[in-house]
Amino acid sequence: MNTHPELAPVSGTFSAQGKRLGVFVISYNAEKLIQETLQRIPDEIWREVEVVYVVDDCSMDETTRAALTYPDPYRKLKVFRNRINRRYGGNQKFGYQYAIDRGLDTVIMLHGDGQYAPEMLPQLFQPLIDGSADIVIGSRMLHRRDALKGGMPKYKFVANIFLTGIENLLSGLSMSEFHSGYRGYTTQFLKRIPLWENSDEWHFDSHILFQAKQAGATITEIPIPTHYGDEVCHVNGISYGLNCIRSALLFRLHRWGLVRLNRYDIAPHSLVDARKLDDPYSSHSLIYRRLRKMKLTHDKVLDLGFGCAGIAAAITQHGAVLDGVDRDPVAIAESGPLFRRTFQHDINDLDNIPFNEKYDIILAADILQFLVDPADILSRLKKYLVKGGMLVVALPNVVNVQPRLRILLGRFPLHHRGILEEQALHFYTLDSMKQLLVRAGWQVEETDVTNVPLTLLFPFLRARRWRLPLWLCRGLTLMFKGLFAYQGLLFCKNPNEADLL
């Protein structure tokens, strides 16, 4: 099948080593070249991969028909066609999501016009298979003279070096080339990044490399031959270059903490939540200071949905004995040593968690909004708290000024964290969260509110010399709680004997 034998690896040397591999052939108006590109994929790749799938981005020619009529002796070829043109980045999003949904371990993107040599697939797959890389880039610029010998126009050669230099400088990466379309990823990496936040345009490729830097992913570059032939370039070079520079600059500002972009908000929740104690007016800090007023020595505390266990880590130092519940095995593994006992369990199924004692304090911070029936859970929790014990609740304030303005503009955007978190099932105002607790039979003895988390948006504010903006924000929040409070905190007392419930 190989029509370029000078590029072919030694037959029979490639093995998937039990991994599920996929080749994603991204295509647009490639009717004349798609079959040749598929034919150039080495036989050993066809034998070892689970699937080769073509995604035609609503071409204006017969790319889909050409791919469907390709003789596929291995019966591993699948062909998809977008109903609308999703653009280069949008097409990649679909292709990588398919790899994730199918359960592949690694996927390599190959261009349907054959500009990047399919014969190099074994070399690109190898670092992904052996675990030495999360990302593999086929680079034409590791040996720059070869790029010119392969027909790269001089203006593209100079522009590639110039743009790559700027992007390396601003991102902290050291790539030989940012602009190769020959790329492979592990799906474990793809699952970690907010893929769908990236651009649908050509600078999607830059976005994903900046995300790799933010995630601490391992990138390996493999030299590949340069080829410029009959393929048609669909890129507006000036617009593309400006978008790349703008993206690199915004990434640098995000790294400095001067702006916050969801696409680069990749740090695990545990790292983000652990920083809440650096903000004197965060929920973690305010709850910790309130609990410090109590005699915590030997108090038994139950932490529901503890995540990074930021509060737990702080109060353990004062002699509290903690048990924790979380359904996330990563949270259990990372934070488990802080607890006497941990229960990997769904809090919705509270009565089947094997508690064998009553607690003095129950923490339910940022958890109730994710439960199917929080009122029912609140009622049942009283069975596990001594009479007079404290329940601590933290819930986001849905009528904070930010969501108010967005709703006024006709938008209700959900995010992977924050007030409008996409996994939340319920939303509350300061009044409705208090009513929720009263209806469940709790005595609300004290309330407080948190500031907008400025230190997460602008990390430099954690330094003491920048506390003035936090104090001003605190004053504004206390004056206009309904408008500026980010979260409501409620400290409740159990008025009932647990054994009588």
Image (cartoon, rainbow, N blue to C red):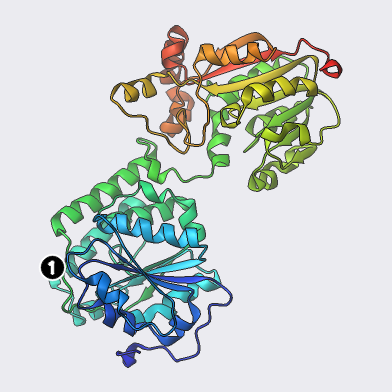
Would residue 358 be found to the left or right of residue 21 on screen? right
- Please tell me whether mark 1 sits on a helix, a strand or a loop: helix
- Return the residue at label 1: 155
Would residue 329 be found to the left or right of residue 426 on screen? right
Asked if 394 appears above or below 350 in the picture, the reply is above
From the viewer's side, name the closer residue of 466 and 40. 40
Q: In which quarter of the image is residue 235?
A: bottom left
Measuring from the top left, give residue 87's x and y in whole percent: 25, 56
The amino acid beneath tag 1 is Tyr
The residue at the point 44 percent across, 43 percent down is 265
Measuring from the top left, give residue 43's x and y in whole percent: 42, 87
Quadrant of the rendering where the C terminus is positioned: top right
The answer to whether any part of residue 173 appears in the image is: no
Measuring from the top left, give residue 299's x and y in whole percent: 81, 23
The residue at the point 44 percent across, 83 percent down is 74
Mark 1 Cα-neighbour bin, 10 Å: few <14, some 14–19, many ≥20 = few
Measuring from the top left, give residue 277's x and y in whole percent: 57, 29
The answer to whether any part of residue 194 appears in the image is: yes
Quadrant of the rendering where the N terminus is positioned: bottom left
Q: Quadrant of residue 420?
A: top left
From the viewer's side, name the closer residue of 364 and 90. 90
Q: Quadrant of residue 303?
A: top right
The residue at the point 37 percent across, 33 percent down is 413
